[in-house]
Amino acid sequence: MQIALLGGTGDLGAGLALRWGRDTDHDLLVGSRDPDQAREAASDYAARLDGTASISGVQNGDAAAQADIVVLAVSPYHLGDLLSTIGDRLSETAIVVTPAVGMERGEDGMSYAPPPQGSVAALVRERTPDPNPVVGAFHTLPAGRLADLDTTLDFDTLVFGDRADAVAQVREVAESIDGLGTLTAGGLGNAAAVESLTPLLLTLGAENDAHGLGLKIQ
Ligand SMILES: NC(=O)c1ccc[n+]([C@@H]2O[C@H](COP(=O)([O-])OP(=O)(O)OC[C@H]3O[C@@H](n4cnc5c(N)ncnc54)[C@H](OP(=O)(O)O)[C@@H]3O)[C@@H](O)[C@H]2O)c1
């Protein structure tokens, strides 16, 4: 499986690349706006995995064009621009995955701030070519704990989307990371509910001096 991590030079991209690189034999394409930064990040991740993983770095559009699964690991405020540059590069069968959450900091901590479409996933759906399914996943994973390979994970991620087969495929790829479980969370109509868990977790962490919180459904 070819997985592209667009914005894979950032925190979530690093965490997912390191986990997939260590735990699976998927081919990982680290994307960036700048191909040099992409190559630098990819070789840094590969070195941290002692050269055992298939990780290469390319510009976002080139990563998107080659991938079966395209993870949009950028801020929601940059998604519109990113999707307009990669939309016509996606293969017709590529699954577009959004982990992105709109948030703002207020007096009471972090709160959910979705775009006018109602959720980030709805924005992604609006800007993604019709044939490509859109799936939401990874919103509640703390990137720092993913990137710390000494941390044993015990988290779940909620996966929703507009096509059941795409949700199933993303669940399988997510579960290939050791210690990560998944649950199907329905369709894109549930996106706002899932996305809004992230600012809640961040507020719980800040208020209770418990940083790096994730979700486990039991
Ligand atoms: N951090 C977490 O713990 C976490 C957990 C779950 C979900 N998420 C979600 O995952 C997404 C990425 O989070 P992150 O913390 O990894 O973000 P980040 O580190 O701040 O940024 C990720 C990447 O976005 C790219 N970027 C910056 N400005 C851009 C622009 N104008 N256009 C296109 N790309 C741009 C940069 O890559 P280049 O400069 O190389 O292009 C950067 O490395 C967010 O939507 C966030 O809500 C984050």
Image: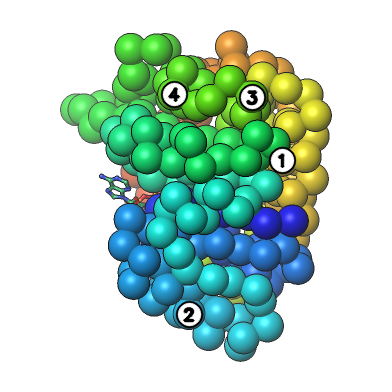
Mark 3–mark 1 contact, CB under 8 Å?
A: no
Asked if the beta carbon under badge 2 is closer than 8 A to the nearest atom of ligand 1, the reply is no
> Which quarter of the rendered picture does the N terminus lie within?
bottom right
In front of the other: label 2 or label 3? Answer: 3
Residue 26: x %, y % from top left? 72, 63
Disc 3 marks which residue?
A: 131
Mark closer to the chain start, 2 or 1: 2
Asked if the beta carbon under badge 3 is closer than 8 A to the nearest atom of ligand 1, the reply is no
Q: Amino acid at mark 4?
A: Arg
Q: CA distance from mark 3 to mark 4?
A: 12 Å
Residue 128: x %, y % from top left? 50, 26
For the residue labelled by badge 2, is the local secondary structure a helix, a strand or a loop? helix
Q: Amino acid at mark 1?
A: Val
Q: Name the residue: 64% across, 45% down.
A: 69
Labelled disc at residue 43: 2
For the residue labelled by badge 4, is the local secondary structure a helix, a strand or a loop? helix
Disc 4 marks which residue?
A: 127
Residue 78: x %, y % from top left? 31, 38
Residue at far front of view: 88
Q: Name the residue: 67% across, 56% down.
A: 2
In front of the other: label 3 or label 1? Answer: 3
Mark closer to the chain start, 2 or 4: 2
